[in-house]
Image: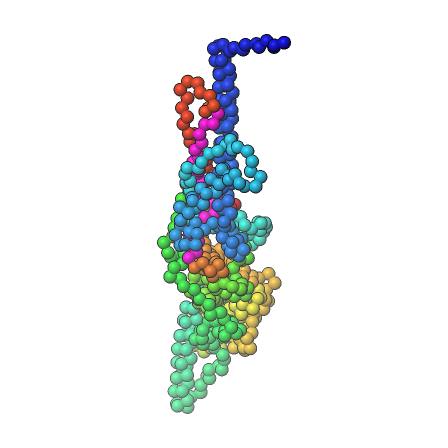
Amino acid sequence: MKEKKEKGSLSIFSALILLLVASLLFTFLESARMYGLRAKSHRNTMLCAESALAEYQIELLENYDVFYLDLGYGERSINLARLKERIMNLSQDNINPKKDRMFFNGANLYRMNVTQCMIEDYELATDDGGAAFMRQAVASMKDNIPYDVAESLFTSAEEVKKTENMAENPEQMMADAKAKIAEERARKTEENRQKQENGEEIQPLEDVENPVEFADSLKTSGVLTKVVENPGDLSVKGIDLSDSIETRDKQCGMKQNVSESTLSQKAVYQMYLQQHFGCYTESIENRVLDYEMEYLIAGKATDQENLESVVKRLLALREASNLISLVMDPAKTADAKTVALLLVGFTGNEGVIEAAKYGVMAAWAYVESILDVRTLLSGGKIAIMKKSNEWTTDIFHISESFQNAAKAKESDNGLSYVGYLQTFLSLKNQSELNYRVLDLIEKNIRMLSGNHNLCMDSMTQQMTVSLAYEAYPLFFRMVTIGNIKNEAYQFVQKQDVSYF
């Protein structure tokens, strides 16, 4: 028995209804796909920008705890084209993976292309007078130093600054006293000679050591030979300053991020410098200079020049501080007056005696300062302003106090050599200090990495990456109603990326 076949039919109205429903469905799908495209492109932009930063300079991280991407890629000048190419390749490969990849299966409903990469702005280590580097250096310190440590550091710096400014000129005191003492004693010697010739009774000059003459004789030798125990062991390292960051034309970033550093940030930065740079008492191996903190202060080409410059400043500071201590100590002032009387008391001239007294005190302060610096360079501590019981030299036996590599008494609450360096660093112009820090880092990393073209003014720590994307409709192609154009979607994703 034959089966009866039913004839099916679809009216034009029903067909139009189905077409409208299909169009609505595919429109929803395409709209959802557009959100997916934007989400995927945003994620891709973030991943690729961060992947570019993952190519940071490893020696900088290992030695200085900072992250930087070398925009020069081994060359001196910034090469943004290479960075853009790198990000474009990463992006294209990420959003359109190859089909032969392991675990890749199925159609890619979010297929799109990257049409352009833009680096809209970037910040270099040398930007804003090196403040860009300073911000990351501060951020790299995992634990901020306690407030009392920061306060102590800047209290010491203010005390040093005040001492340097308030002290009278010891050198002029000594010069005036030396001239007057020599003139008066020469006059008295001639007067005695004439009296002897005339058979008259004379008043012989006191046979007393002249502290001013002794102190003046010390200044004829090199400053380092007076304070360093073994001058022959001093570092002979040096650097070429002709291409220093401080003086050369620097490449500039595009990001404006100017901000004033707080006292707390400056204190943390000081601790960062202390941890990452060596000095005479705490040198670090495999560096272009042994006395790095001294270079940050003095900026000279050789270790010995930098050490000498710092020692001279230390001597001047200690001499000024010691002179103030002497003036404020009635007992020691009386001792200086006694020596002055022994030297020129025969004149009966109070003005000459007072000039001699202050010259003696200045000489006393200078000799004590040499012993102070010896103690500091050997690892001891000396208070900025000494108390009476912390004094070492004896004005009545000044040369004996100086013999046999003598050193000053240590002060329990004093500053170490590194502490004095810290105070000098805190008083420096911030941009000048930052540039010298970056200069040392640049030269050290060149030596450690073997890349002699590496430049810190090519190093970026944050930037803004923009990627332009293009994608074509997918579901709109399956059904078309009306005049719907099959044009590509164009959109841009922007991502700020930073190491800190």
- Give how far across and how far down residue 165 sits, in percent: 45, 59
Residue at position x 52%, y 38% from top? 99
The magenta stretch is 453-475
- Give how far across and how far down residue 396 sits, in percent: 53, 76
Residue at position x 38%, y 57% from top? 247
- Give how far across and how far down residue 460 sits, in percent: 45, 48
Colour treatment of the image: rainbow
Please name whichever residue, 462 or 282, is drawn nearer the observer in this view of the structure.
462
Residue at position x 51%, y 47% from top? 54
Residue 197: which quarter of the image? bottom left
Residue 408 is left or right of residue 446, and the answer is: right
Task: Indicate the quadrant containing the N terminus: top left, top right, bottom left or bottom right.
Answer: top right
Q: Does residue 346 show up? A: yes
Residue 280 is left or right of residue 240, and the answer is: right
Residue 463 included in the magenta stretch of the image: yes
Residue 296 included in the magenta stretch of the image: no
Please name whichever residue, 306 or 393, is drawn nearer the observer in this view of the structure.
306
Q: Is residue 188 above or below residue 222?
A: below
Please name whichever residue, 394 or 429, is drawn nearer the observer in this view of the structure.
429
Q: How many marks?
A: 0
Residue at position x 40%, y 44% from top? 254
Residue sitting farthest toward the right: 1
Q: Does residue 131 show up? A: no
Residue sitting farthest toward the left: 249
- Give how far across and how far down residue 412 sits, in percent: 61, 63
Please name whichever residue, 95 or 48, is drawn nearer the observer in this view of the structure.
95
Residue sitting farthest toward the front: 1
